[in-house]
Amino acid sequence: MATEAVRETGWASRGSCRASDPELFFPDAPFPEQEARAKAVCGTCPVIVECRAYAVRAGESEGIWGGLTTAERRSLRFPPGWRQRAAS
Protein backbone atom coordinates (compact mmCIF):
# COMPACT_ATOMS: atom_id res chain seq x y z
CA MET A 1 0.00 0.00 0.00
CA ALA A 2 2.80 2.49 0.87
CA THR A 3 4.59 1.75 -2.41
CA GLU A 4 1.36 2.44 -4.27
CA ALA A 5 1.00 5.84 -2.55
CA VAL A 6 4.59 6.77 -3.42
CA ARG A 7 4.06 5.74 -7.04
CA GLU A 8 0.77 7.66 -7.13
CA THR A 9 2.39 10.97 -6.17
CA GLY A 10 5.95 10.44 -7.40
CA TRP A 11 5.25 13.03 -10.10
CA ALA A 12 4.84 15.71 -7.41
CA SER A 13 8.59 16.11 -6.95
CA ARG A 14 8.76 17.39 -10.56
CA GLY A 15 5.94 19.93 -10.17
CA SER A 16 6.50 23.63 -10.88
CA CYS A 17 4.72 24.40 -7.61
CA ARG A 18 7.63 22.97 -5.60
CA ALA A 19 9.39 26.35 -5.84
CA SER A 20 6.28 28.31 -4.78
CA ASP A 21 4.80 29.19 -1.43
CA PRO A 22 2.09 26.58 -0.63
CA GLU A 23 -0.18 29.46 0.46
CA LEU A 24 -0.49 30.36 -3.23
CA PHE A 25 -2.26 27.04 -3.89
CA PHE A 26 -3.96 26.64 -0.50
CA PRO A 27 -4.93 30.14 0.68
CA ASP A 28 -7.00 30.78 3.79
CA ALA A 29 -9.19 33.17 1.80
CA PRO A 30 -8.93 32.68 -1.97
CA PHE A 31 -9.28 35.67 -4.28
CA PRO A 32 -9.22 35.94 -8.11
CA GLU A 33 -5.68 37.34 -8.38
CA GLN A 34 -4.27 34.54 -6.24
CA GLU A 35 -6.14 31.95 -8.27
CA ALA A 36 -4.77 33.41 -11.51
CA ARG A 37 -1.19 33.38 -10.15
CA ALA A 38 -1.50 29.76 -9.03
CA LYS A 39 -2.98 28.73 -12.38
CA ALA A 40 -0.11 30.52 -14.17
CA VAL A 41 2.38 28.34 -12.26
CA CYS A 42 0.37 25.26 -13.17
CA GLY A 43 0.35 26.36 -16.80
CA THR A 44 4.13 25.94 -16.96
CA CYS A 45 4.17 22.62 -15.11
CA PRO A 46 5.54 19.46 -16.76
CA VAL A 47 3.26 17.26 -14.62
CA ILE A 48 -0.02 19.20 -14.87
CA VAL A 49 -1.83 16.20 -16.39
CA GLU A 50 -0.73 13.82 -13.61
CA CYS A 51 -1.52 16.40 -10.92
CA ARG A 52 -4.99 17.10 -12.31
CA ALA A 53 -5.78 13.40 -12.70
CA TYR A 54 -4.64 12.67 -9.15
CA ALA A 55 -6.71 15.51 -7.66
CA VAL A 56 -9.88 14.49 -9.50
CA ARG A 57 -9.39 10.79 -8.71
CA ALA A 58 -8.56 11.45 -5.04
CA GLY A 59 -11.38 13.96 -4.60
CA GLU A 60 -9.04 16.67 -3.28
CA SER A 61 -11.35 19.14 -1.57
CA GLU A 62 -8.94 22.02 -1.07
CA GLY A 63 -6.61 24.14 -3.15
CA ILE A 64 -5.58 24.42 -6.76
CA TRP A 65 -4.36 21.18 -8.30
CA GLY A 66 -3.44 20.72 -11.94
CA GLY A 67 -4.60 24.25 -12.68
CA LEU A 68 -8.13 23.60 -11.41
CA THR A 69 -10.00 24.98 -8.41
CA THR A 70 -12.10 22.81 -6.14
CA ALA A 71 -15.27 23.79 -8.02
CA GLU A 72 -13.68 23.06 -11.40
CA ARG A 73 -12.53 19.63 -10.25
CA ARG A 74 -15.95 18.90 -8.79
CA SER A 75 -17.58 19.72 -12.14
CA LEU A 76 -15.32 17.13 -13.80
CA ARG A 77 -16.28 14.48 -11.27
CA PHE A 78 -19.98 15.37 -11.18
CA PRO A 79 -21.11 16.89 -14.49
CA PRO A 80 -24.47 18.69 -14.70
CA GLY A 81 -27.36 16.26 -14.51
CA TRP A 82 -25.42 13.42 -12.92
CA ARG A 83 -28.06 13.05 -10.23
CA GLN A 84 -31.04 13.01 -12.56
CA ARG A 85 -33.14 9.88 -12.59
CA ALA A 86 -32.75 7.54 -15.49
CA ALA A 87 -35.71 7.59 -17.86
CA SER A 88 -38.01 4.64 -17.32
Image (cartoon, rainbow, N blue to C red):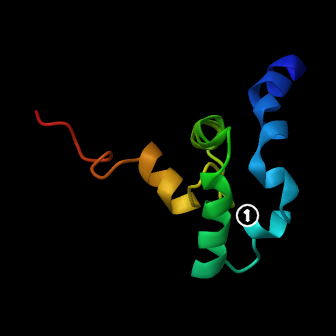
**Quick one: 21 or 8, which is closer to the camera?**
21
Q: Is residue 8 visible?
A: yes
Other-residue count near label 1 (Cα within 10 Å), few / some / many at <14 / 14–19 / ≥20 = many
The quarter holding residue 5 reads top right
Measured as percent of width and height from the top left, residue 57 is found at 59, 36
| Lateral position of residue 42 relative to residue 71, left or right | right
The quarter holding residue 62 reads bottom right
Q: Is residue 26 above or below residue 79?
A: below
**Quick one: 38 or 8, which is closer to the camera?**
38
Measured as percent of width and height from the top left, residue 22 is found at 83, 63
Q: Which residue is mark 1?
A: 25
In the picture as drawn, the residue positioned furthest to the front comes out as 44
Rendered residue at 85%/26% (across/down) = 6
What is the tally of numbered marks visible in this picture?
1
Measured as percent of width and height from the top left, residue 25 is found at 73, 63
Quarter of the image with the N terminus is: top right
Rendered residue at 68%/59% (across/down) = 41
Q: Amino acid at mark 1?
A: Phe
Looking at the rendered structure, the secondary structure element under dot 1 is helix
Measured as percent of width and height from the top left, residue 33 is found at 61, 80
Q: Is residue 54 above or below residue 6?
A: below
Rendered residue at 66%/76% (across/down) = 34
Q: Is residue 42 above or below residue 8?
A: below
Q: Is residue 26 visible?
A: no
Q: Is residue 40 above or below residue 33?
A: above
Quarter of the image with the C terminus is: top left
